[in-house]
Image (cartoon, coloured by chain):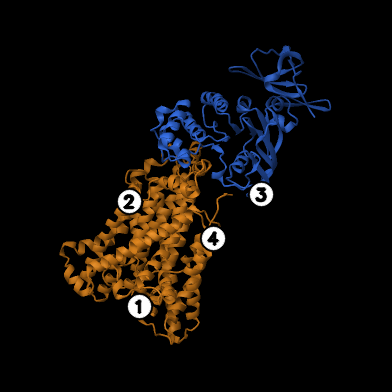
Amino acid sequence: MRHDRSIPLIYVAVYAVIVVIVPLIFLVYYSIRVSPSRLFLSVLSASIRQSFLQASISTAISLGTGLLFGILLIIYNGRFKNVIISLLLVTYVLPGIIMALGIISLFGYSSRFWEIIYGNVIYNAPLIAVLAYSTGNSTSIREVYSAKVIGANDSQVVTRFYLPNSLRGGMLGGILSFILSFEGFSLPLIIGGPSFSTMEVMIYEFKNVFPAFSQFPFSTASFLGLLQVVILVVPLYAYLSIQSKSRRNDSSLPPPLRRYNSIALLGLVAFLIFALTPLLGMFIKYPLWQISVVEMTRKLQISMAILLGNTLVFSFVSTFIAFMISIVIVVYRFSFRNQFLILLPLIFSPVTLALSYFLVYGDYIPTSLLIILIFTVIVVPLNIRMMSQAVDTIPLSETYSSKTLGDSTFSTFFKVQLPRIKWEVSTILSLMFITVLGEFSSIVTVYTASTETITVGIYKLLLLRDIRDTYYLTEIFLIVIFISSFVINQLGKSGAVGQA
Amino acid sequence: MVQLDKLRLEGVSKKIGGLDTLKNVSFRLKEKEIKVILGASGSGKTSILNCIAGIIEPDSGSIFKDEKNITHLRIEDRNIGFVFQDLGLFYSMNVAENIAYGLRIRTKDVKEINRKVVEISKVLDIEDHLRKFPSQLSGGEKQLVSLARTLVTGPDLILMDEPLSSLDSFLRNVMRWYIKDIQQKFNISIIYVTHDLADAEILGDTIAILDEGTILDEGKKEEILNHPKTAGIARILGYNLYQKGESSYAIHPSKVLIGGSTKIKIIYRERGIKNNYLVETEYGKINFTSDRELKENDGISLENSVLIP
């Protein structure tokens, strides 16, 4: 219906070829050279079984928990609402390796299946809760009051109005939860051990630990990567097809269920305690003031400055590039076909992505650039989706007013749309930044001695069984995450990206 | 002297979601003319404006402005003002910034921009609100800001999409005359879409009646309002329809006279600013308003009825 010019197919096609098609062709090329021994088949079936089992159970529990707390978020209308949402999002974007270490700090090194599930639920339930809240909260308050006027009670209001609307976002989160748990890496690698290895862990193992498992290097890892792509295509297609539009609910009417405010707050606080306990446990067990950076540096054989520098540079550069790409794509509205091509990199899990990019570009570009490329491709699709949803909440008449007054599409975005969503943009920027900052599975697949980041450092300390220093580095990392995301958030709200 | 068309639509059709929203719509708008497009909700009024502004592209047909084909021209290159139903004010900017927005695109001269903003805000009596944000304004004030923002760039054609629909009766009455006044002062052509007959009566030079995406009739206001050509048009204009012998007639509630040969039975009588009646006649039910009190033996006169061909 819109008359705007969309991005020509040729640009999108070039993007798709570079970031998806060529890496996919390489994966296929390597895969067909795999030698299917009996051992390989048994490893394959065990990892597929684990991926499915962990993903299904985690998703079922996360969906129930997330929906319940999503509805509590809708009901609660107190002053801590934004704080609660931020804390839930923090839980979601926290690096998996930190969550894994947090769980170990609680339960010890016991390698239990249900601890992986607990970790997955802590990750996915907050995401589902926030998504369910965002669609559920768009329920028309006028409709709810109309129902109440003709006799609907509070539970009917929840089941007939809020729950169905929350389900739209909840289902979207559920699909995402399944995909993320299926691609689970840090939790099964660190908590689970060999008996609970998922496909993602095995791809990493066959790439880095046993590259010569078959006669053709990397063919086993490529085969597993390709198989995972094939398995996840269907849920990914479902995820991309579901539109979870939320709209600004500008009604001035009071919230219909405000009398349950305190109960909802209590439930939400309980949920936050459930989700954040592993983190708190870590800080209590290993207080930060006992840290010895010199000792840690000696064990890591790399200076803390280089470790921090690598982490921040890779993250800042890839966040910046991803943000710029996303702006161009969001400004020039794209057709479904183009949108599908742009989101196509989502078919790769981080480890598969890293493996395929290593196979294609590893010999031609420095590892640091390879890492930035991988990080950028990881965050662009989700960033585009979140930005598009934020832009869609602005009334079209504002955009078209600007254009009928003579402004261009690009300028309209910066002058009219961006200032209206600057809070959302700063949140998206922070989320993107934290996501790449904590990226572990992809970088552990391709890093070299000079491109180590903090997550790799944490993992190395863990492999050295130096538990104390592992936790201290993790705590430093958490502080880096909070400070840098705070800075980005402030930048976004105050001007650099948010102002007209 | 031949008067050129400011705007001309030729056979514009548009399908939205598989439905024929506009079917072969054609009309002309002269310089300095206000054309009111009158139609019920869902008749395609907004879609016509969206096609003219370039927000949607017609599937077929052409749109000419000043004899130039603008059917495929970009929105920002058309120089057409648009006052949206929800006004489309920029909520992240204050009133002055809203008004200055279009000027900033056209000139870098800050003094000139400031001068024009102050000038238009004085004309529309909103200079006290320049530092306020849209969320701090009343409905009428928002309306004026939207008008100011549109007028300040000097468009020669303005599209208005039911801009008064959210205002109370008093403000609606005031704003109708305001728009009329503005049009005279700025010598602009306006296409105004509405479902409200009062808007059409006060604002329109010409009227087009739209129903299910089709223009049913178009012409001078007096002609369209007083001589509906079909029962459908009469219905949209609020006429009573009745059958007398083989012929169909229509009479507007304001044209029914008390005292006449048509016998009546009063069904309802409601006293308001005027007297409102629903009466039973030998031709069916008729509703009308009058300043006079009606008694059943007075009868009514239907002599102002219009024969529907």
Mark 1 is surrounded, within 10 Å at the Cα level, by few (under 14), some (14 to 19) or many (20 or more) other residues, namely some
Q: In the picture, which quadrant includes the N terminus of chain B?
A: top right
The amino acid at mark 1 is Pro
Label 4, on which residue?
A338
The amino acid at mark 4 is Asn
Label 3, on which residue?
B59
Q: Are marks 4 and 3 in contact (CB under 8 Å)?
A: no
The amino acid at mark 2 is Leu
Chain identity of mark 2: A
Mark 4 is surrounded, within 10 Å at the Cα level, by few (under 14), some (14 to 19) or many (20 or more) other residues, namely many
Label 2, on which residue?
A491
Q: Which chain is drawn using orange?
A: A
- Dot 4 lies on which element? helix
Tell us which disc is closer to us: 3 or 1. 3
Q: Please tell me the colour of chain B.
A: blue
Mark number for residue B147? none
Q: Are marks 2 and 4 in contact (CB under 8 Å)?
A: no
Residue A24 showing in the rendered view: yes
Pinpoint residue B260: horizontal percent, then vertical percent: 75, 13
